[in-house]
Amino acid sequence: MDVVDLRVAEHYSPGMPPIHVHRRALFLLASGAVLGSCRATRPTSGMTGVTGRSGMTGLGETLARLERGGRLGVAVLDTATGAVEGHRLDERFAMCSTFKLVLAAQVLQRARRGGPALASTVELTERDLLSHAPVTRALVDAAAARGERAATASLVTLAHAAQTTSDNTAANLLLRHLGGLAEFTAYCRANGDDVTRLDRYEPEMNDVQPGDVRDTTSPRAMAGLVARLFGEAGLAREDRATLRSWMIETETGAARVRAGLPAGWVAGDKTGTGGGTCTVKVNDVVWIEPPGRAPLVVAAYYDTATPGEWPSDAQEAVLADVGRAVAGA
């Protein structure tokens, strides 16, 4: 498989080292059957009071042993039963760019329900661009080369860019086009999540200091929200398949939870990373399809408690260990 230079992390800036990963094959076979069978999740407000057995007894203790300073919060939700296992399930953590997975779902669902069509376009110029804008910057540069004052991008292009490359400009444009930050939080509430909240735009939303509840979620809440979106009460079947394929296409999490999963397991994710003005955050929300069983949702949030600009390999490896623990359980 080809090795690619992947400069798509949420807070990438010039001078950061490139991340070299092996390009994953896209396992899209039988997606309709897999997603159509995901019907047993029972998320409630904040996913409290979930019953059922996950078959992963003892996983919480294993995850607690992975905590190497700071706080590691992990929820593992079994979509067959709705049962949740994990560690620090209900503590708040900075979302960082993991919110973009939910934002992409919001775009798909609103278009399906009569909101802005996926083909609707948004205008953008050089003034809109943030430091991490791999897709939107290319669009603006191409428009300038044609002598045009502004570029245009469809909502589906922006949603795909926000999910697969974590394009910050794309996320901000979508948030504003859909009605702002309060509309995102309202979307979470409408889907049974009374914990997750978005209060600021990129990149300010990544600066979450101890005790700050702005732009936070809990592992249990995020896992429950994603499970609901992929269940029959959430996105339409076609939109579930689209979002699933985008998550599998995403490569920003190659060194995180997916790195600890066995070869052949189908998985897709959305990462989140913080640093600079706050302690380093290393996050990953993952949809996993183990062979022969219902899918799992893993929401992993690691606040390292270490100041820095960017996570170290060792800090990212903690989330790879989470993947190994889940697979082992």
Image (cartoon, rainbow, N blue to C red):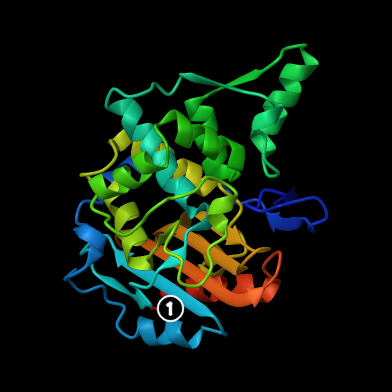
Q: Nearer the viewer, residue 217 or 157?
A: 217
Q: Nearer the viewer, residue 152 or 156?
A: 152
Image quarter where the C terminus lies is bottom left
Type of the residue with mark 1? Gly
Q: Is residue 320 above or below residue 99?
A: below
Q: To which quarter of the image does residue 32 belong?
A: top left
Residue 170, horizontal then vertical, whole percent: 56, 35
- Residue for badge 1: 328
Q: Is residue 283 above or below residue 70?
A: above
Q: Is residue 152 above or below residue 272?
A: above
Side of 298 relative to 144 (left or right):
left
Side of 84 relative to 260 (left or right):
left
Q: Nearer the viewer, residue 213 or 84?
A: 213
User: Does dot 1 land on a helix, a strand or a loop?
Assistant: helix
Label 1: how many Cα within 10 Å (few below 14, some 14–19, many 20+): few
Does any portion of residue 216 appear in the rendered image?
A: yes
Residue lying at 34% horizontally and 73% vertically, measured from the top left? 89
Residue 211, horizontal then vertical, whole percent: 45, 71
Residue 80, horizontal then vertical, whole percent: 23, 61
Q: To which quarter of the image does residue 107 belong?
A: top left
